[in-house]
Amino acid sequence: MILLMRHGESTWNAAGRMQGQDPRPPLTERGRHQVAATATLLAGGLLEAHPEVRVSAIVTSPARRARQSADIVADRLGLQVREEPLLLERGLDEPWESVEQRIRAVVTADLSPGTLLMTHGDVVAYAAHLLAEVSVPVPANASVIGLTPRPTPASWQLDALC
């Protein structure tokens, strides 16, 4: 299982501004608290149906809001963070095909079970749609979904939504 988490509330989220791939907006204080609460859940075993699943690695979008969120989770779990530009939010004029290629490149990489991908709401929702063929709205800040590969090639199951 891999976990996809949306970053906490950023200053631009709070202002209702579209961020796109702009890396500058930081987390708000509320965003820091949101992520800290989710980190506590992750530390205690997030998934009731899969209590054995623990975050084993953290890979993050390099956008400041995602990196700050990843660092909060990493500090709570005692893990290191690796940046991955493929996890950036969809660019304002970027075609969805490009986002699809980026998502597929990340999830087909050699990720260990329990890897947490810290990314953006549009990427989380599109990954669920693309991989598990499940439509989910753009998730709330600091929420997590779990995706488990099925035995069928290139097929995933949505296992958790928090």
Image (cartoon, grey):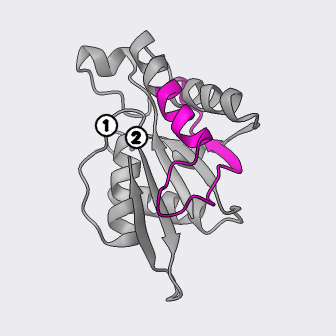
User: Which quadrant is home to the N terminus?
Assistant: bottom right
The mark found on residue 143 in the picture is 2
Q: Secondary structure at mark 1?
A: loop
Q: What residue is disc 1 on?
A: 140
Question: Is the residue 29 above or below the residue 96 in the image?
Answer: above
Give residue 76's position: percent from left, percent from top. Answer: 67, 29
The amino acid sitting under disc 1 is: Ala
Q: Residue at x 58, y 23 (%)?
A: 68
The answer to which quarter of the image holds residue 93 is top left
Q: Is residue 40 magenta?
A: yes
Give residue 53's position: percent from left, percent from top. Answer: 61, 58
Q: Residue at x 49, y 50 (%)?
A: 4
Residue bounds of the magenta highlight: 35-64
> Crowding near pointer 2: few (<14 within 10 Å), some, many (20+)?
some
The amino acid sitting under disc 2 is: Ser
Q: CA distance from mark 1 to mark 2?
A: 6 Å
Is 17 in front, or is 4?
A: 4
> Crowding near pointer 1: few (<14 within 10 Å), some, many (20+)?
some
Q: Residue at x 35, y 57 (%)?
A: 126
Q: Is residue 45 left or right of residue 6?
A: right
